Amino acid sequence: MPQAPVNGSSKVRFGPFEANLPTGELFSNGKRIRVPAQSFQVLQMLLDHPGDLVTREQLRSLLWPSDTFVDFEHGLNAAVNRLRDALHDSADRPRWIETLPRRGYRFIGTIEPSVEPAAPPVAPKPPEAPAQIQPRPLSWKAAAWAIGISLSVAAILAGYFLRPHSEASAVTLSPVPITSYPGVETSPAFSPTVPALLLPGTVIRLPAVKVLICMSKPSGARHSSA
């Protein structure tokens, strides 16, 4: 199974080469190079341990299960040789893969930092507008109560402003002297037949109006009206 690279990246760059570990592809200057699957597995294990020895036994366990009977020595040599051909490398003058006789192999190249494409910036989410509280429609019972109260108030106001005022306006009465004859102001009397005021030796006819006569006598005074 594919192993994770030492730098945690899915792509490993060295020189003009780039190994895409999840897909098992090798590129040189952006162009894909055909590499057998077992040769790429050897490259991946070497890249996972740059500068360290990878034994032949480790590579055998990687390429062939324990219950597989195969010419291990010939098969491993063939896989490494095909890998060197793809990398334009040489066992005599290695640039990428060094052979440690009877022990294994070691990656001696320089692995460049892999630059992953930056994620696009996430635009800030605009603040949500506060939810508007919709007025609840009045139920028919509430509407009936409101109408009833309004009609009652209108009826009370109409009755107050439109009712007739039966109270009579206050009348200010001013005393008016009936006669100017001195000595005859006493013992007045009203005629029972005609509107006239009877004084001693004098008859004073009165208009057909109500008259309030104030007697000037201190005691026993009385008020008469006609």
Image: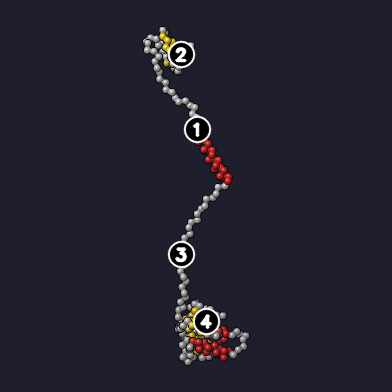
Sooner in the amino-acid sequence: mark 4 or mark 2: 4
Q: Residue at x 57, y 47 (%)?
A: 139
Q: Residue at x 51, y 84 (%)?
A: 33
The amino acid type, in three-letter code, at marker 4 is Glu
Dot 3 corresponds to which residue?
124
Q: Measure the alpha-carbon separation of dots 3 and 4.
A: 38 Å
Instruction: Between residue 102 and residue 176, name the one nearer to us.
Output: 176
x, y percent for residue 135? 52, 50
Q: Measure the alpha-carbon separation of dots 4 and 2.
A: 143 Å
Position of the N terminus, as image quadrant, is bottom right
Query: From the viewer's perspective, is residue 1 above or below residue 215?
Result: below
Instruction: Kindly state the secondary structure of the residue where label 3 is placed.
Output: loop
Sooner in the amino-acid sequence: mark 2 or mark 1: 1
- On residue 127, which mark appears? none
x, y percent for residue 72? 58, 89
Please state which of the two labelled residues, at mark 3 or mark 2, is closer to the viewer.
2
Q: Measure the alpha-carbon separation of dots 2 and 1.
A: 41 Å
Q: Residue at x 59, y 90 (%)?
A: 71
The amino acid type, in three-letter code, at marker 3 is Pro
Q: Residue at x 52, y 89 (%)?
A: 81
Dot 2 corresponds to which residue?
195
The amino acid type, in three-letter code, at marker 2 is Pro
Sooner in the amino-acid sequence: mark 3 or mark 4: 4
Dot 4 corresponds to which residue?
25
Instruction: Sort mark 4 into few (<14), some (14-19) or many (20+) by Cα contacts within 10 Å.
Output: some
Instruction: Kindly state the secondary structure of the residue where label 1 is placed.
Output: helix
Return the residue found at the far bottom: 92
The amino acid type, in three-letter code, at marker 1 is Leu
Asked whether disc 1 touches disc 3, contact meaning CB atoms under 8 Å apart, the reply is no
